[in-house]
Image: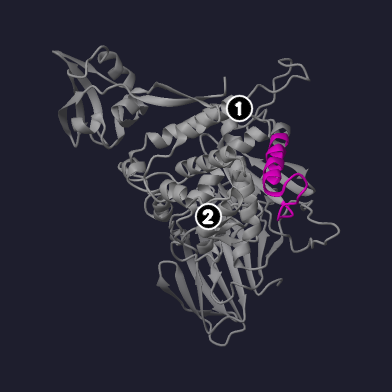
Amino acid sequence: MSAPVHYRVEAADLHAHLWRVTLTVERPAPRQRVSLPVWIPGSYLVREFAQHLQRLQAEADGVPVPVRALNKNTWEVACGTAHTVVLRYEVYAFDTSVRTAWLDSTRGFFNPTSLCLRVHGREQGPHALTLVANDATRHWRVATALPRADAPRTRRRGWRWPDDAGMGTYLAADYDELADHPFELGTFWCGDFDVRGVPHRFVVSGAPAGFDGARLLTDTARLCEAAMALWHGPHGRPPFDRYLFMLHATRDGYGGLEHRHSTALVCARTDLPLAPLPGTHAPDDAPVPLKAGDGYTTLLGLISHEYFHTWNVKRLRPREFARYDYDRENHTELLWFFEGFTSYYDDLLVLRAGLIDQATHLELLARTINQVLSTPGRLVQTVAQASFDAWTKYYRVQENTPNATVSYYTKGALVALCLDLTLRAEGHTTLDDVMRALWQRCGGGPMREADLRAVLRRLARRSFDAELDAWVHSTAELPLQPLLQRHGIRWVEEPAPLAQRLGVRVDESGGALRLRNVLRGSAAEAAGLAAGDEWLAVQRSQHVWRVHRLDDVALHARGLGTDEPLLAWVARDGRVLRCALHWPAPAHTVKLLPPA
């Protein structure tokens, strides 16, 4: 065995979606405790991975021994004086997200936090994981950034991706390193590129025919170079020696999760770049310019976001994350910085990489501004509170969420924008300089908000405490319009869509108009409409009209004055109610335009 803690992982039953794990521990404690994490770093919700673990049993020196459950995710094994204990169990895997595990006849994927029990007291020592092929998976390949046991690295040769299918043994220095390396298995597309001498690999599963892998590699390499230039200047090297992108294309998926040497991504198949059909373009034609609504633009922003996290949260990280506690929530008030600033830079780096133009970037920025300004919760919860409450509020979305919370992603991105614009206007420094100085000050490791304040004070030659107190620790509105206009960006107000004007968020699928959210202080709330209502009809004077979409409501409310109520007929809990809706005054959304 290559390590005193060793996991043997095999696809036990593809159709039942079961992984089989055999965990061997040398020199166990007399009463050895093991546990499965309840969350995965980067996704701040207790997800109770242990719910999918079954058939746990143990042998000490070949003799069956009792396994006693201590709580929801921890077990104790009676090892006595045994030299070796072996635990066997299965894990059900049928979640297409990037956070857990998946197994079927076409593909396997897992994060070790979903499969690998943590051996208490042995977390700091070496861990090995062996993938075992069987008749059903013998043709599968493996993608992971965890080092292979039979491919040692040297300073001279650096990192090399395995040449074979990848089944075999992988080594981690400790449990944290193991937990931070997901595995992709199957018959995926694969491509390689180097950035500043660092080998990068991109694997894609589920891609449709005509997928343009060459373009994806070229564009991703430009994003990686833009990120390295921001953090390390024109010639610096990153703090990692390899990087792996793992993308799974589904019918309508979206998401990503960062890791120290890789990221797991999910996108819709329609978001992937497609090669031109034969004869439709000359060979030297440039790709069609990307726009804000393009799925591929969204995918590039996601790739940029997760890659930026390689610095900002995986290495430079909250002080509270210096050591992860896998058994409970790990609270921090700094997600507005680590997720929000990353969200500010993701599309900005797509712009700097030359993949979108300034007008498209401003359109993406305006979407973020409109999203925050249309969220009543921004006046209830500070972005620092939103960071701390992520575990109980952000990831537990319900009908009142937009009224009580604000996103630390979107408002955090706007805090970064306000900082950057203010710094540039005063002429001493930029947010890029601040990020690099923070990296140096904290040694690429844990940081506190006090570190950010200190760096701002030094580089900007004044304190930014007042701004951070107002923008981060209060619910005051951000000075977006004057700051943007100071830099020549035109702030144009356009009529808001009807949903925003009424203060509702709706679901129009299946031919029915249902209210998902009713926003605080809105005309819909004043009328007594509630989340969950099915909006059946509107009545104006003596005429009642059936509605299926908000467009129907707009049609029958045409020309309605603010003093004339519109009766909304809604179904709630088996009853039909009439609500007097007073037509609201016009509302506006923001459009940003480049300098004239």
Instruction: Give the side of residue 399 with respect to residue 174, left or right.
Output: left
The residue located at (44%, 64%) in the rendering is: 328
Instruction: Give the side of residue 265 with respect to residue 212, left or right.
Output: left
Tell me if mark 2 has few (under 14), some (14-19) or many (20+) residues whose alpha carbon lies within 10 angstroms of its own: some
Residue 228 in magenta stretch: yes
User: Which residue reaches farthest front?
Assistant: 461
Asked if disc 2 and disc 1 are in contact, CB closer than 8 Å, the reply is: no
**Residue 555: x and y, percent?**
29, 14
Helix, strand or loop for the magenta stretch, by majority: helix
Q: In terms of secondary structure, where does tag 1 sit?
A: helix
Tell me how far mark 2 sits from mark 1, CA to CA: 30 Å
Q: Is residue 176 above or below residue 470?
A: below
**Residue 27: x and y, percent?**
62, 82
Stretch of the chain drawn in magenta:
218-242
Q: Say which residue label 2 marks.
A: 453
Q: Say which residue label 1 marks.
A: 358
The residue located at (61%, 43%) in the rendering is: 430
Residue 237 in magenta stretch: yes
**Residue 365: x and y, percent?**
51, 32
> Can the viewer see residue 249?
no
Tell me if mark 1 has few (under 14), some (14-19) or many (20+) residues whose alpha carbon lies within 10 angstroms of its own: some
Q: In terms of secondary structure, where does tag 2 sit?
A: helix
Q: How is the image coloured?
A: one colour
* Quadrant of the rendered image containing residue 406: top left
